[in-house]
Protein backbone atom coordinates (compact mmCIF):
# COMPACT_ATOMS: atom_id res chain seq x y z
CA UNK A 1 0.00 0.00 0.00
CA UNK A 2 1.34 3.40 -0.98
CA UNK A 3 2.03 5.89 1.78
CA UNK A 4 -0.59 8.64 1.94
CA UNK A 5 0.78 11.97 0.74
CA UNK A 6 1.61 14.71 3.20
CA UNK A 7 -0.81 17.65 3.33
CA UNK A 8 -0.19 20.32 0.71
CA UNK A 9 0.97 23.78 1.83
CA UNK A 10 -2.56 25.09 1.41
CA UNK A 11 -4.00 22.22 3.46
CA UNK A 12 -1.45 22.84 6.20
CA UNK A 13 -2.30 26.54 6.38
CA UNK A 14 -6.02 25.82 6.54
CA UNK A 15 -5.55 23.21 9.25
CA UNK A 16 -3.35 25.51 11.36
CA UNK A 17 -5.67 28.50 11.02
CA UNK A 18 -8.81 26.57 11.89
CA UNK A 19 -7.21 24.72 14.78
CA UNK A 20 -5.71 27.80 16.46
CA UNK A 21 -8.91 29.78 16.00
CA UNK A 22 -10.90 26.95 17.60
CA UNK A 23 -8.41 26.64 20.46
CA UNK A 24 -8.61 30.32 21.36
CA UNK A 25 -12.33 29.86 21.98
CA UNK A 26 -12.41 26.32 23.36
CA UNK A 27 -9.03 25.42 24.85
CA UNK A 28 -9.14 23.88 28.32
CA UNK A 29 -7.72 25.86 31.24
CA UNK A 30 -5.30 23.39 32.82
CA UNK A 31 -2.67 24.28 35.45
CA UNK A 32 0.27 22.85 33.51
CA UNK A 33 -0.58 25.22 30.67
CA UNK A 34 0.24 28.15 32.92
CA UNK A 35 3.91 27.25 33.23
CA UNK A 36 6.93 26.56 31.07
CA UNK A 37 8.91 25.04 33.95
CA UNK A 38 10.46 21.89 32.42
CA UNK A 39 10.02 19.88 35.62
CA UNK A 40 6.35 20.84 35.93
CA UNK A 41 5.78 19.93 32.29
CA UNK A 42 7.54 16.59 32.84
CA UNK A 43 5.39 15.81 35.87
CA UNK A 44 2.17 16.61 34.03
CA UNK A 45 3.14 14.55 30.99
CA UNK A 46 4.14 11.54 33.08
CA UNK A 47 0.90 11.73 35.06
CA UNK A 48 -1.25 12.08 31.94
CA UNK A 49 0.09 8.87 30.41
CA UNK A 50 -2.90 6.49 30.33
CA UNK A 51 -4.69 8.63 32.96
CA UNK A 52 -7.62 11.01 32.57
CA UNK A 53 -7.21 14.71 33.24
CA UNK A 54 -9.73 14.86 36.10
CA UNK A 55 -7.75 12.23 38.02
CA UNK A 56 -4.45 14.00 37.40
CA UNK A 57 -5.50 17.50 38.51
CA UNK A 58 -5.49 17.00 42.32
CA UNK A 59 -2.41 14.77 42.25
CA UNK A 60 -0.46 17.28 40.13
CA UNK A 61 -0.93 19.99 42.78
CA UNK A 62 -0.18 17.58 45.63
CA UNK A 63 2.99 16.31 43.95
CA UNK A 64 4.43 19.74 43.25
CA UNK A 65 3.56 20.86 46.77
CA UNK A 66 5.60 17.98 48.15
CA UNK A 67 8.36 17.84 45.50
CA UNK A 68 8.60 21.37 44.06
CA UNK A 69 11.81 20.75 42.09
CA UNK A 70 13.90 18.03 40.53
CA UNK A 71 16.32 18.36 43.44
CA UNK A 72 13.54 17.90 46.00
CA UNK A 73 12.29 14.82 44.20
CA UNK A 74 15.80 13.41 43.77
CA UNK A 75 16.45 13.59 47.52
CA UNK A 76 13.13 11.98 48.47
CA UNK A 77 12.77 8.42 49.70
CA UNK A 78 11.68 6.02 46.94
CA UNK A 79 8.93 4.45 49.05
CA UNK A 80 7.56 7.90 49.88
CA UNK A 81 7.59 8.86 46.19
CA UNK A 82 5.63 5.73 45.27
CA UNK A 83 3.13 6.32 48.08
CA UNK A 84 2.59 9.92 47.00
CA UNK A 85 1.85 8.78 43.45
CA UNK A 86 -1.03 6.53 44.48
CA UNK A 87 -3.79 6.04 43.34
CA UNK A 88 -2.85 7.09 39.78
CA UNK A 89 -1.75 3.56 38.84
CA UNK A 90 0.88 2.42 36.33
CA UNK A 91 3.27 2.51 39.25
CA UNK A 92 6.43 2.25 37.19
CA UNK A 93 5.91 5.95 36.39
CA UNK A 94 6.90 7.41 39.80
CA UNK A 95 10.01 5.21 39.83
CA UNK A 96 11.00 6.49 36.41
CA UNK A 97 10.24 10.09 37.38
CA UNK A 98 12.36 9.64 40.49
CA UNK A 99 15.19 8.20 38.39
CA UNK A 100 15.00 11.11 35.92
CA UNK A 101 15.23 13.58 38.82
CA UNK A 102 18.27 11.85 40.28
CA UNK A 103 20.06 11.66 36.94
CA UNK A 104 19.25 15.31 36.20
CA UNK A 105 20.72 16.37 39.54
CA UNK A 106 23.78 14.12 39.22
CA UNK A 107 24.59 14.86 35.60
CA UNK A 108 22.84 18.04 34.45
CA UNK A 109 23.04 20.38 37.44
CA UNK A 110 19.48 19.77 38.54
CA UNK A 111 18.07 20.90 35.20
CA UNK A 112 16.13 18.91 32.66
CA UNK A 113 18.02 18.86 29.33
CA UNK A 114 16.35 20.44 26.31
CA UNK A 115 17.79 18.39 23.44
CA UNK A 116 15.87 15.48 21.99
CA UNK A 117 18.54 12.78 22.17
CA UNK A 118 19.34 13.41 25.84
CA UNK A 119 15.65 13.45 26.76
CA UNK A 120 15.14 10.15 24.92
CA UNK A 121 18.02 8.62 26.88
CA UNK A 122 15.97 8.77 30.08
CA UNK A 123 13.89 5.68 30.81
CA UNK A 124 10.25 6.75 30.78
CA UNK A 125 10.65 9.50 28.18
CA UNK A 126 9.62 8.39 24.70
CA UNK A 127 9.17 10.30 21.48
CA UNK A 128 5.86 11.90 22.47
CA UNK A 129 7.00 13.02 25.94
CA UNK A 130 10.27 14.37 24.54
CA UNK A 131 8.34 16.38 21.94
CA UNK A 132 5.94 17.68 24.58
CA UNK A 133 8.77 18.81 26.86
CA UNK A 134 10.64 20.45 24.00
CA UNK A 135 7.61 22.37 22.73
CA UNK A 136 5.84 23.18 26.03
CA UNK A 137 8.86 23.87 28.24
CA UNK A 138 11.55 25.05 25.82
CA UNK A 139 9.52 26.58 22.99
CA UNK A 140 11.09 24.37 20.34
CA UNK A 141 9.38 23.43 17.10
CA UNK A 142 8.85 19.79 18.04
CA UNK A 143 6.00 17.58 16.79
CA UNK A 144 3.99 15.37 19.11
CA UNK A 145 1.94 12.24 18.57
CA UNK A 146 -0.21 10.71 21.28
CA UNK A 147 -3.44 8.76 20.87
CA UNK A 148 -5.59 11.88 20.54
CA UNK A 149 -3.29 13.61 18.06
CA UNK A 150 -2.95 10.46 15.96
CA UNK A 151 -6.73 10.12 15.77
CA UNK A 152 -7.18 13.71 14.58
CA UNK A 153 -4.47 13.53 11.94
CA UNK A 154 -5.59 10.14 10.66
CA UNK A 155 -9.23 11.16 10.32
CA UNK A 156 -8.62 14.59 8.81
CA UNK A 157 -5.86 13.74 6.33
CA UNK A 158 -5.79 9.97 5.67
CA UNK A 159 -8.97 8.05 6.60
CA UNK A 160 -7.80 4.80 4.94
CA UNK A 161 -5.77 1.93 6.31
CA UNK A 162 -5.07 0.73 9.83
CA UNK A 163 -4.43 3.70 12.15
CA UNK A 164 -2.67 1.43 14.65
CA UNK A 165 -0.18 -0.13 12.21
CA UNK A 166 3.50 0.69 12.75
CA UNK A 167 3.89 2.04 9.22
CA UNK A 168 0.86 4.28 9.75
CA UNK A 169 2.27 5.56 13.03
CA UNK A 170 5.48 6.57 11.25
CA UNK A 171 3.40 8.35 8.64
CA UNK A 172 1.36 10.13 11.30
CA UNK A 173 4.59 11.38 12.88
CA UNK A 174 5.50 12.84 9.48
CA UNK A 175 2.06 14.46 9.26
CA UNK A 176 2.46 15.93 12.74
CA UNK A 177 5.79 17.47 11.74
CA UNK A 178 4.39 18.71 8.41
CA UNK A 179 1.42 20.60 9.85
CA UNK A 180 3.38 22.11 12.76
CA UNK A 181 3.67 25.89 12.35
CA UNK A 182 6.84 27.89 12.91
CA UNK A 183 5.07 30.16 15.39
CA UNK A 184 2.54 29.41 18.15
CA UNK A 185 3.91 25.88 18.50
CA UNK A 186 2.87 25.67 22.16
CA UNK A 187 -0.75 26.55 21.44
CA UNK A 188 -0.85 24.43 18.31
CA UNK A 189 0.27 21.24 20.03
CA UNK A 190 -2.04 21.84 22.99
CA UNK A 191 -4.87 22.49 20.54
CA UNK A 192 -4.23 19.22 18.71
CA UNK A 193 -4.54 17.31 21.98
CA UNK A 194 -7.65 19.21 23.03
CA UNK A 195 -9.40 18.61 19.72
CA UNK A 196 -8.78 14.89 20.03
CA UNK A 197 -9.78 14.80 23.68
CA UNK A 198 -13.00 16.81 23.43
CA UNK A 199 -14.32 16.75 19.83
CA UNK A 200 -12.59 14.14 17.68
CA UNK A 201 -13.05 11.48 20.35
CA UNK A 202 -12.74 7.74 19.81
CA UNK A 203 -16.49 7.09 19.97
CA UNK A 204 -19.32 9.51 19.43
CA UNK A 205 -17.16 12.11 17.73
CA UNK A 206 -18.74 15.57 17.54
CA UNK A 207 -18.26 16.27 13.85
CA UNK A 208 -20.93 18.98 13.83
CA UNK A 209 -18.79 21.32 15.94
CA UNK A 210 -15.38 20.28 14.59
CA UNK A 211 -13.36 23.07 12.95
CA UNK A 212 -12.13 20.55 10.35
CA UNK A 213 -15.57 19.24 9.31
CA UNK A 214 -15.58 20.87 5.87
CA UNK A 215 -12.40 19.11 4.72
CA UNK A 216 -11.99 16.11 7.05
CA UNK A 217 -11.61 13.01 4.87
CA UNK A 218 -13.24 10.68 7.39
CA UNK A 219 -16.23 12.99 7.70
CA UNK A 220 -16.52 13.24 3.91
CA UNK A 221 -16.46 9.45 3.60
CA UNK A 222 -19.25 9.06 6.16
CA UNK A 223 -21.39 11.65 4.38
CA UNK A 224 -20.99 9.82 1.07
CA UNK A 225 -21.96 6.52 2.68
CA UNK A 226 -25.01 7.97 4.45
Image (cartoon, grey):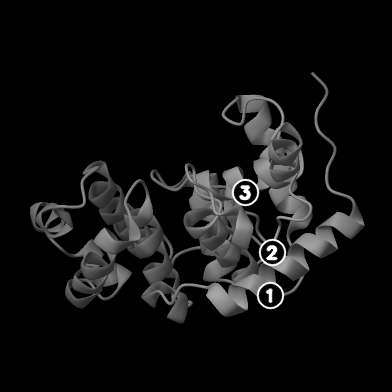
Look at mark 1 in the image and give the residue it sits on: 21
Element type at mark 3: helix
* Closer-to-camera residue (90/121): 90
> Does residue 188 lie above or below 146 as drawn?
below
Secondary element type, mark 1: helix
> How many labels, in total?
3
Q: From the image, tell me which residue sits under label 2.
A: 141
**Does residue 119 appear to the left or right of 217 in the view shown?**
left
Position above or below: 140 against 103: below
The image position of residue 200, as x and y in percent, is 56, 51
> Few, some or many C-alpha atoms within 10 Å of disc 3 (few <14, some 14-19, many ≥20)?
many
**Depth check: 42 or 152 in front?**
152
- SS for dot 2: loop
Q: Nearer the viewer, mark 1 or mark 2?
A: 1
Give 216 or 70, whichever is nearer the viewer: 216
Q: Is residue 47 left or right of residue 163?
A: left
Give the residue pinned by disc 3.
152
Around disc 2, counting alpha carbons within 10 Å, would you say few (fewer than 14), some (14 to 19), or many (20 or more)? some
User: Residue 62 appears at what percent x and percent y?
Assistant: 19, 71
User: For residue 114, which quarter of the picture?
Assistant: bottom right
* Residue 139 seen in this snapshot: no
Marks 1 and 2, the one that precedes in the sequence: 1
Mark 3 or mark 2, which is nearer to you? 3
Of callouts 3 and 2, which one flags the residue occurring earlier in the amino acid sequence?
2
Q: How dense is the environment of label 1, judged by Cα within 10 Å: few (below 14), some, or many (20 and up)?
A: some
* Structural distance between the alpha carbons of marks 1 and 2: 19 Å
Amino acid sequence: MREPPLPSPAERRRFRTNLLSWYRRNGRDLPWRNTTDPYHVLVSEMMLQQTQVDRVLPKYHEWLGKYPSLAALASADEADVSATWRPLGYNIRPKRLHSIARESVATYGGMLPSDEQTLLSFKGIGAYTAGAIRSFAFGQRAPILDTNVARVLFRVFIAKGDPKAHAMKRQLWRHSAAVLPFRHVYDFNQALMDLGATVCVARGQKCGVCPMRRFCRSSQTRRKEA
